[in-house]
Image (tube, coloured by chain):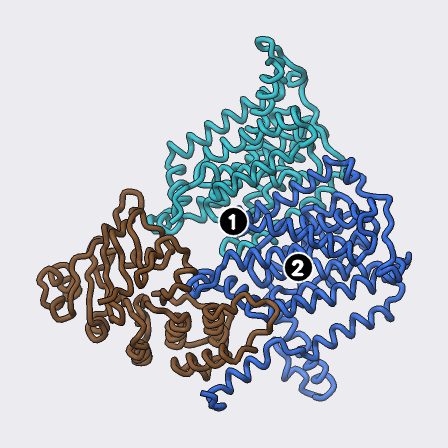
Chain colours: A blue, B brown, C cyan
Amino acid sequence: MSDMTTLSPVAASTARIGRWRWQETAFWLLVVASYFLFSDRYLILTEIAWLALFALSLDLILGYAGIVSLGHAAFFGVGAYGVGLLAKHGIIEEPVLALLAAGLMAMALGFVTSFLVIRGTDLSRLMVTLGIALLLRELANRFSDITGGFDGLQGFTIAPVLGLFEFDIFGRTGFVYCTVVLFVLFLAARRLVNSPFGLSLRAIHNNRLRAEAVGIPVDRRLIAVYTVSAFYAGVAGALFTQTTALASLDVFAFERSADLLLILVIGGGGYLYGGLIGAVVFKILQEIFSSITPQYWLFWIGLVFVVIVLVGRERMRRWARVAPDFLLRRLGLSRGVGGGGSRGGEP
Amino acid sequence: MTLALETIGLDKRFGGLHVTCDLALKVEAGARHALIGPNGAGKTTVINLLTGVLTPDAGRILLEGRDITALPVNRRVRAGLARTFQINQLYPELTPLETIGLAVSERLGHGADWWRRRGTRAEVNDEIARHLEHFRLTDVCDERTVTLPYGKQRLLEIAVAIACGPRVLLLDEPAAGVPESERHDILAAVASLPRDVTVLLIEHDMDLVFSFADRISVLVNGALLVEDTPERIARDPQVRAVYLGEAQDA
Amino acid sequence: MTNFLTILFDGVAYGMLLFVLASGLAVTLGLMNFVNLAHGAFAAFGGYVCAVLVNRSGVPFFVALPLAFAAAALAGVVAERTLFRHLYRRSELEQVLFTIGFVFMAVAATDYVMGSSQVFINLPDVLQGQIDLFGVGIGRYRLMIIVICGLLTLAIQGTLARTRFGARLRAAVDDPRVASGLGINVPQVFAFTFAFGCGLAGLGGALGAEILGLDPYFPLKFLIYFLIVVTVGGSSTITGPFMAALVLGIADVAGKYYVPKLGAFVIYALMIVILIWRPHGLFGRTVAR
């Protein structure tokens, strides 16, 4: 039975699963390089880091398991307020522990609400996710004696990370802290999606009927991934609060959930880096748009949504692949062929 | 005689439509049993009831003597009841290797492993390789299912069901839509199913039914008309009247 | 007691307004399975058209209302023919993304053209103040809303039940494929209904400016309310959304009055509970094969 010739295709294929590729090394080296290259832009880099984590969280449920959520900000918000309240009342001072605690709070909410999300039709799923986020926002607004209401939760300071690294006004500590957390959780997510569990999520996304018919307990898997995703979103929210020392009602806002969908769509779901790349692109777009028209940048973000859907991501990706070739060919022509330049030109 | 699959008084209505009436189906262990019937006889409903997609209004379903009526779809699979679909139900973006791997690791109880890289269990890999080889899918095992030719997809459909390690296998029109040139592969695969697996074949194709089955049940208007050996079914005037006659006209 | 009746009255007015605003969405969902999160943009458009006509051009309010309807319906036709119809066959996620983008653009554009502050429509004197009916204080404006929306609801119901177009529409909602097999031009029926729904939304926006408040963020603020009406009511009938809108209107007004601390919380919680209990809506189809 251990005949190597029959096993080899399978063995060869399974050996490739989850192998670390050079593009990934390059990506993370770029992240490290950004610390040195953009030392005057730590605040925005920090934002990108927690946004990337937030998008990674959505990727787990949307890109892998295929659950569309219009209210992922609910978990972000719980993490944000959670960490803020822990700091304000001095319950857990140390940021890493507080981060974990806030993530667990979001996770608990994720677990409870997952039962509502997995059942029902697609539309009611959208409604329930949206409704939960709005409901939490309303709660935070009403119980203003705890949350600070409309003005947000203020007047707390975040203790040094591990008791050693003070958060500085340039955001250097914040950036390093967020990036390390992002990297660690990214590795965990990478492990998760390359496991049998991760494959079963993709199976459910691809064909739920078949997944059930091979014995996969679909509901249980969806509950599990939704809960994990809530933890990630909670940690992202907690990072937001820890690096800004602020938690306001807009952590729950619909726009935040909507932007998150956009980020994942820009970067592409289902390969983990989509959310990270999307977060970078989104933040750059946001910077550009708000420098053109600070008040109306929403218009341009909306336009990006519309264009992405109308053009279609597949087509865009094809363009992205073809465009450099096309340019190179153009350059090659203009340099190489002297006389008959129009020969190779495409109509 | 031991029964692999049995239904007792199975009943289902859709509003005013009585689609399954007091159905008593008995499939012996190791049998090659065919369920036939004219269009609209309610064959698909029976499959959906057996597999747990639909809940019966009355009656019970026994798998090797165990009552599975209340089990959800995935638990029935774990209990040993697998199926193929009349229209392929595969994962377009996954490869045959992954498709079969999912079924195998789920059966062996490793499906929920979330911290272990998949492909690191020799027992699972060996079994995947065996199924791929048996169904001649080894050479395409790393290609996305959506890109495979239809005949290969049809084979994969059967391979997945076998990978679930069933005691009873429901084959829902396995040769449906397969072009003549690839038909042979499918028939060979069906013929070479392990003998210890009981097969219930739901089929339109009379050639396939009579070459394959050693027992036939005829379903008409949701009720069992007759159950007998292929020879007697072929001679049964009742069956000829409602079913074979119709088929000959067509 | 009188207080209770006043609240009930306000709630009914509010609910009917929500129904007129959201009924177009019910059709979009039921007929084309199209998740249109941008529906509120047409309502806001109607509201702003009315405001400009009345406040700047001095058009009488009751003349401006039908004009708001027409303007929103026209905008609906243009948007449907140029943009939305490309999305009917696309995935739900794409529909969601596209319509969110659309509504974002609409919000920013409105902000740019009309400014970010809330807009009030100058109402004629007839509609201001209260009248006293059997000791119950009744706002004249709200009374007008109930009358107009009530008539509209009856008209919609009548159109659906009695006319040839209504029969076609119902057939198309029931099963678009069979309907087109019967020779019904489903896209045309749909385009017309979409335009009409947008027109109603525009009229609702014009009527609701006084009660709901009209500012550029209107389409986002009330998105959840429209969606509640449709999902809770179910999209297979028109009575479902109507009942849902009434319940929602009354519950919201009563909730804000009796338990101001909880506010909209009650509404959202109620919605979630209902959707868990009946995923196809309170009055939707129960038979899911």
**Which mark, residue A57?**
2
Q: In this orientation, does residue A258 appear?
A: no
Q: Quadrant of the N terminus of chain C?
A: top right
The Cα–Cα distance between marks 2 and 1, rounded to whole angstroms, is 27 Å
Q: Chain of mark 2?
A: A
Left or right of A205: which side holds A87?
A: right
**In this view, C182 is above or below B74:** above
Which quadrant would residue C139 be assigned to in this image?
top right
**In this view, A160 is above or below A142:** below
Q: What's the amino acid at mark 1?
A: Phe
Query: Is label 2 or label 1 in front?
Result: 2
**Which mark, residue B89?**
none
Extreme-top residue of the structure: C134
Circles 2 and 1 in contact, beta carbons < 8 Å = no
Q: Which residue matches tag 1?
A: C34
As helix, strand or loop, the secondary structure at mark 1 comes to loop
Q: In this orientation, does residue A116 appear?
A: yes
Q: Whole-percent x and y of residue B85?
A: 36, 65
Same chain shared by disc 2 and disc 1: no
As helix, strand or loop, the secondary structure at mark 2 comes to helix
Please give the name of the residue rendered at 11% of the width and 68% of the height, measured from the top-left corner. Answer: B232
Q: What's the amino acid at mark 2?
A: Ser
